[in-house]
Image: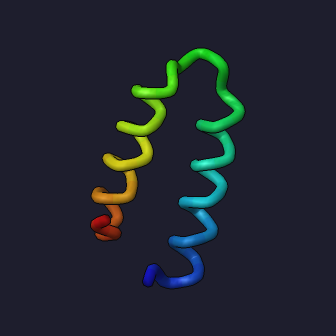
């Protein structure tokens, strides 16, 4: 589990990406995975 501050930052990022209509669904998923891995949250 992530520390609370990182979890809040990731959630804000996640919401911003989800509301963006520029990226297609596959690219959005890749961005989610890459950002999660960058902060140490491996699936």
For residue 29, which quarter of the picture? top left
**Residue at image x 58%, y 62%?**
9
Measured as percent of width and height from the top left, residue 4 is found at 58, 82
**Residue at image x 38%, y 51%?**
35
Total marks drawn?
A: 0
The figure's colour scheme reads rainbow
Measured as percent of width and height from the top left, residue 2 is found at 45, 80
Q: Quadrant of the C terminus?
A: bottom left
- Toward the top, the furthest residue is 22
For residue 40, which quarter of the picture? bottom left
Measured as percent of width and height from the top left, residue 39 is found at 35, 64
Left or right position of 32 against 38: right
Q: Is residue 1 above or below residue 34?
A: below
Q: Is residue 13 above or below residue 29?
A: below
Q: Is residue 39 above or below residue 22?
A: below
For residue 36, which quarter of the picture? bottom left
Q: Quadrant of the N terminus?
A: bottom left
**Residue at image x 62%, y 59%?**
11
**Residue at image x 67%, y 47%?**
15
């Amino acid at each position: 589990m992530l520390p609370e501050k990182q979890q809040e930052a990731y959630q804000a990022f996640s919401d911003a990406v989800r509301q963006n209509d520029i990226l297609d669904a596959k690219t959005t998923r890749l961005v989610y995975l890459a950002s999660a891995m960058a902060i140490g949250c491996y699936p």
